[in-house]
Structures are given as structure tokens and as C-alpha cells.
């Protein structure tokens, strides 16, 4: 019942094993890298129908809780109906934010969205393959909002394509991950006309955006989207941030 019909999947043709690996990968990452505990309060940005959070269902125990939001109404309605109704400490919200690829009719700008949560209300935040669809002004706002809702010392884990690791045409694991269009300093995209389809940031640009938001990059785990011999586990590059006083909030 926690697995939706395929037309709601992120990749409707994906093998089932691909669907489930995300849940267990993210459970491991959040425990190992972000101090996730059964009593943690967790935010997921861009949760879709709750794919990566399935590994948290048997783990989080009240007062431990989870909040996920996304811009896709049918996926969030599925999660509310099938997951939230059975586990009231795991909640899902729709935000009607514009994204040219995912929600072209959205009425709210990602550059100005205020996350629908109180300040300092989460221990851990994460986003799987979401900042890879946010243009710089939107990414800057989402980092600021993450910092606002995280408790001091809280950690977040966001996946990116780090531009420094792009080795040039033919070296990425698929055509979509060719970042040949530089749109501004330290930011490149696959499709200049639809930059949010998939976007890459240099580490320096990302560290600046994070510092301006009051987040410090603590660790980077390289992904296998690009040819390299230092890849760790996930397809994308995983970046762990800490909300602490050594990063200066703008
Ligand atoms: C590649 S999918 C990943 C979904 C989910 N994180 C997962 O791994 O199962 C990208 C997700 O980001 C969401 N998204 C795109 N722009 C967003 C925004 N501005 N705010 C929140 N979610 C957004 C999309 O609706 C979509 O669910």
C-alpha cells in the first residue's frame, strides 16, 4: 500500500529494486551523516509520493516525526492517504510552487516561498535530487529557509551535480548529465532553455550560497554520475551541511 501506481513514480519504467534502494540508502545516509535518531524531527524537501522516506516509517517514533512537501498534488495526495493516515507523525504538504519541468502552472515562486513550518523545528533536513532542479535564486531561498527551520547544530543532506566533477561530453552516465551551458558563474545546465530540467553548481558557488544562508558545508560524498574513481554510493554528489554559528547568515 505504500508503493503507488507506476504512473505516480518518479521513473515509471524503473525496476522495483531501484524504487526500494532509495529508501534504504537515505535511511543509512541520514543515520551515518546527519545523526538521525528515532526521536528526530525530519524535513524532506521535494518528497514526491514519499519514496525515500519509506525507510523512516518503522524508525521514527513520536516525538520523532517527519514532514515532507512537494509541488505535485497527486503524489502528495497519495502519501497523505496511504502513509499519513496510518502514521500521523509522518505528514505531507502540497506547496503550489512553479517549476517549468514539474509544475508549470504553479502560482508561488521558489525564490520567495516560505516553508510552511516554524523556525527551529527540525533536527535533520534532506532533499534527494531536488536542488538539481533549482535555479540559483531558488536554491538560495531554499538554503535560507532550511537554515531557518533547522535547529542550531542540525544537519542537512542535499544531493547535487557538482560542476567541478564534470569531465566533459561523453564522460557522464547519461546524456541528461552533460552540463555544457554555463548560465552564470559556477552554474551550468543541460538545456539552456529549460535550466531547471537539470542543473549543476560548482562547489565554490554552492559554499557561498550556503554561507550566505548560514549553513556550512561539512562533507561531500562524490556520486557516480560522472566518470571518476572516487565515487561513493549515490548517483549524485551528496553534500552535508551544518547549521552552526561559524557560517555567517546574510
Ligand atoms: C527527481 S524528483 C525526486 C523526488 C524525490 N525526492 C525522490 O527521490 O523520490 C524531483 C522532485 O522535486 C520536486 N520539486 C521540483 N521543484 C521543487 C520545488 N521548488 N519545491 C519542492 N519540490 C520541488 C518535484 O516535484 C519532484 O518530486
Image (spheres, helix red, strand yellow):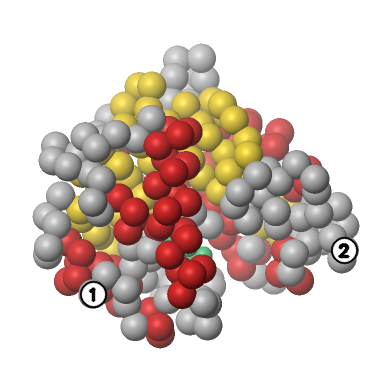
Q: Residue furthest top?
A: 246
Across and down, in percent, residue 44 comes to 36, 50
Where in the image, quadrant-wise, is ligand 1 located?
bottom left
Residue 1 lies in quadrant: bottom left
Across and down, in percent, residue 31 comes to 40, 37
| Point 47% across, 60% down: residue | 21
Viewer-nearest residue: 39 or 168: 39
What count of labels does the image hold?
Answer: 2
Secondary structure under the numbered disc 1 in the rendered image? loop
Disc 2 residue crowd, few under 14, some 14–19, many 20+, Cα 10 Å: few
Q: Is residue 245 above or below residue 107?
A: above
Across and down, in percent, residue 202 comes to 72, 42
Viewer-nearest residue: 48 or 6: 6
Distance between the Cα atoms at labels 2 and 1? 42 Å
Q: Nearer the viewer, mark 2 or mark 1?
A: 1
| Point 42% across, 53% down: residue | 24
| Point 51% across, 77% down: residue | 15
Q: Which residue is mark 2?
A: 169
Q: Note whether ligand 1 is within 8 Å of mark 2.
A: no
Q: Is residue 37 left or right of residue 233?
A: left
Q: Which residue is mark 1?
A: 1
Q: Is residue 139 left or right of residue 1?
A: right
Q: Residue furthest front?
A: 17
Across and down, in percent, residue 245 comes to 45, 15
Q: Is residue 178 visible?
A: yes
Q: Quick one: label 2 or label 1, which is nearer the N terminus?
A: 1
Disc 1 residue crowd, few under 14, some 14–19, many 20+, Cα 10 Å: few
Q: Is residue 176 above or below residue 66?
A: below
| Point 65% across, 70% down: residue | 194
Residue 125 lies in quadrant: top left
Q: Is residue 93 above or below residue 230?
A: below
Q: Is residue 85 left or right of residue 48?
A: left
Amino acid at each position: 500500500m505504500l508503493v503507488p501506481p507506476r504512473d505516480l513514480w518518479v521513473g515509471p519504467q524503473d525496476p522495483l529494486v531501484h524504487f526500494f534502494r532509495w529508501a534504504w540508502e537515505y535511511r543509512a545516509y541520514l543515520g551515518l551523516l546527519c545523526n538521525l535518531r528515532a526521536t528526530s524531527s525530519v524535513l524532506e524537501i521535494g518528497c514526491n509520493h514519499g519514496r525515500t522516506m519509506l525507510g523512516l516509517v518503522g524508525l521514527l517514533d513520536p516525538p520523532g516525526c517527519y514532514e515532507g512537501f512537494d509541488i505535485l498534488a497527486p503524489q502528495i495526495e497519495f502519501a497523505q492517504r496511504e502513509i499519513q493516515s496510518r502514521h500521523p507523525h509522518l505528514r505531507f504538504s502540497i506547496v503550489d510552487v512553479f517549476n517549468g519541468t514539474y509544475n508549470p502552472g504553479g502560482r508561488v515562486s521558489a525564490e520567495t516561498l516560505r516553508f510552511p513550518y516554524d523556525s527551529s523545528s527540525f533536527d535533520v533536513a534532506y532533499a534527494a535530487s531536488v536542488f538539481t532542479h533549482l535555479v540559483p535564486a531558488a536554491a538560495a531561498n531554499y538554503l535560507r529557509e532550511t537554515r531557518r527551520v533547522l535547529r542550531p547544530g542540525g544537519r542537512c543532506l542535499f544531493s547535487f551535480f557538482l560542476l567541478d566533477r564534470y569531465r566533459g561530453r561523453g564522460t557522464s552516465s547519461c546524456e541528461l548529465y552533460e552540463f555544457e551551458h554555463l548560465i552564470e558563474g559556477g552554474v551550468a545546465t543541460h538545456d539552456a532553455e529549460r535550466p531547471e530540467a537539470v542543473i549543476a553548481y560548482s562547489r565554490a558557488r554552492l559554499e557561498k550560497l550556503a554561507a550566505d544562508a548560514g549553513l556550512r558545508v561539512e562533507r561531500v560524498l562524490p556520486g557516480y554520475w560522472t566518470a571518476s574513481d572516487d565515487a561513493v554510493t549515490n548517483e549524485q554528489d551528496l553534500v552535508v551541511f551544518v547549521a552552526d554559528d561559524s557560517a555567517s547568515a546574510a
